[in-house]
Amino acid sequence: MTRQVNVDGVTRDATPEELAEIEARASEPAPPQPRHLTVLAFRNRFTRAEKIRIELAAIDDPAASAESRARAATVRVGQADLAAATYVDVDRADTREDVQAFEAMDLLDAPGRALAILDDPIQAHERYTG
């Protein structure tokens, strides 16, 4: 099979080596598509009850223990990062850590919810395309 290639503006038959390279590139898997969600789509992966628990967990109580105050600060930091985000990359380590921390703090509805929020397939209406 003859295949034409264009090299420096000159069209010619491909050499066997060029044909092999063309075939190799054609069989390479496509790079993975980034797993970016709109901020609203990411928030909508949480139930209303989860969002309420997260909001309540973010409230600082100056009379609380240092551990409780650190937990509230952890939640506030995650919320501030989300508020500043253009999109949410569900494969980023810090995003995953935040959602898994919410589960560890019992802010999510059930065990395994963190992975469902992070790893469920991204639907077309959720995808950030900017």
Image (cartoon, rainbow, N blue to C red):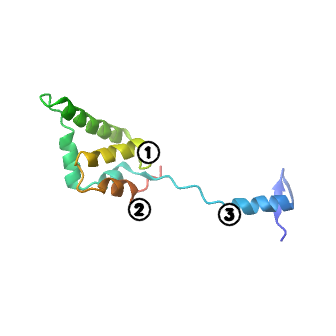
Residue at 77% from the left image edge and 58% from the top image edge: 21
Q: Earlier in the sequence, mark 1 or mark 2?
A: 1
The Cα–Cα distance between marks 1 and 2, rounded to whole angstroms, is: 19 Å
The amino acid sitting under disc 3 is Ser
Residue at 75% from the left image edge and 60% from the top image edge: 22
The spot of residue 65 in percent (x, y) is 16, 30
Residue at 18% from the left image edge and 37% from the top image edge: 59
For discs 2 and 3, the disc positioned in front in the rendered view: 3
- Residue 27 is marked as 3
The spot of residue 6 in percent (x, y) is 82, 56
> Which residue matches tag 1?
92
Q: Earlier in the sequence, mark 3 or mark 1?
A: 3
The Cα–Cα distance between marks 3 and 1, rounded to whole angstroms, is: 28 Å
Question: Badge 3: how crowded within 10 Å, few (<14), some, or many (20+)?
Answer: few
For discs 1 and 2, the disc positioned in front in the rendered view: 1
Q: Is residue 55 left or right of residue 39?
A: left
Q: How many marks?
A: 3
Q: Is residue 55 left or right of residue 21?
A: left
Q: Mark 3 and mark 1 in contact? Answer it, CB < 8 Å.
A: no
Residue farthest toward the left in the current orientation of the protein: 63
Quadrant in the rendering for residue 44: bottom left
The spot of residue 43 in percent (x, y) is 31, 51
Question: Badge 2: how crowded within 10 Å, few (<14), some, or many (20+)?
Answer: few
Give whichever of 28, 39 is nearer the camera: 28
Q: Is residue 122 left or right of residue 34?
A: left
Residue at 32% from the left image edge and 47% from the top image edge: 99
The Cα–Cα distance between marks 2 and 3, rounded to whole angstroms, is: 27 Å
Quadrant in the rendering for residue 28: bottom right
The amino acid sitting under disc 1 is Arg
Q: Mark 1 and mark 2 in contact? Answer it, CB < 8 Å.
A: no
> Which residue matches tag 2?
123
Q: Which quadrant of the figure contains the N terminus?
A: bottom right
